[in-house]
Image (cartoon, rainbow, N blue to C red):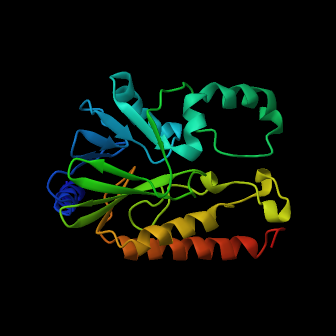
Amino acid sequence: MIRSSIFLLSLGLAAQSLPAGLQFSSGPINTLRLPGNVVIYGDSRAAPREVWVTHVRRDVLWAAEANVAAGAKLTVPEAEARQVTDAGKFWSLFRQTRFHDYAQRSTKLPVDSLAVARMVKGGDRLTAGEASVEVIDTPGYSAGAVSYLISSGGKRIAATGDLIYSGGRLLEIYSLQDAIPETKTRGYHGYAARAGQLIASLKKVQAWRPDVIVPARGPMITEPSREIDLLIGRLQSLLDSHFSTDALR
């Protein structure tokens, strides 16, 4: 009971960090509602006009699928659009190569293709009612992710997907698995290979000096700079420990 009360209080305090016209709803996948009937991540409780996603992993994209089915226009990162518009291509290849999968990338990709209304990349600028939005490339947790930097009512809000989880944490490490071209290493041995990209992306968000971060999952982050520093420090310590024994050191 005490923990539940503390959690509800924290949600209330976090909601006060948002300017008028922006609404946050927590859930298995969060919802950030912007002016103009635009939502980021998806909204199972309402029918938005547009839904913007930061990356297209299946365990996040499902929240937007019902909105798209109801007529919402979908915005996705340009670098990951093919995974949405031609979902079957990955699975057809995976069925042929799954017993010799040397890429070892996450298979949490869409099963069914979706219609994409707009593709975005770093440097693009969007609007949602009174809110102005800058798109930045933030690869790391997924290879082609973006973040939306929202300026509204004198506040700066960053929607960063799964780039960071509350408490200076990351959901898991396996999703950072990838090839290391510099050592001609395939993804099978590329433990946390995108950690460097993720750290660079975190620093890019931090440099923008957001007042709050709204991740795809978990509580809002009301001390962004401190929690970004925490996560970067933890990742660097993890990598130092790993590469003290790894054959690629």
Front residue (pair 144, 95): 144
Q: Is residue 82 left or right of residue 154?
A: right
Residue at 38% of width from left, 22% of height from top?
Answer: 69
Q: Is residue 243 left or right of residue 47?
A: right
Task: Determine whether 242 is above or below 81 in the image.
Answer: below
Q: Is residue 4 left or right of residue 31?
A: left
Residue 92 x/y as whole percent: 72, 25
Q: Quadrant of residue 236?
A: bottom right
Residue at 60% of width from left, 35% of height from top?
Answer: 82
Residue 81 x/y as whole percent: 55, 38
Number of labels in the image equals 0
Q: Quadrant of residue 134?
A: bottom left
Task: Determine whether 209 is above or below 149 in the image.
Answer: below
Residue at 45% of width from left, 61% of height from top?
Answer: 164
Residue at 22% of width from left, 41% of height from top?
Answer: 36
Q: Quadrant of residue 65?
A: top left
Residue 117 x/y as whole percent: 43, 33
Residue 136 x/y as whole percent: 47, 59
Residue 109 visible to the viewer: no
Task: Determine whether 37 is above or below 238 in the image.
Answer: above
Residue 81 visible to the viewer: yes
Pick the quarter of the image with the C terminus: bottom right
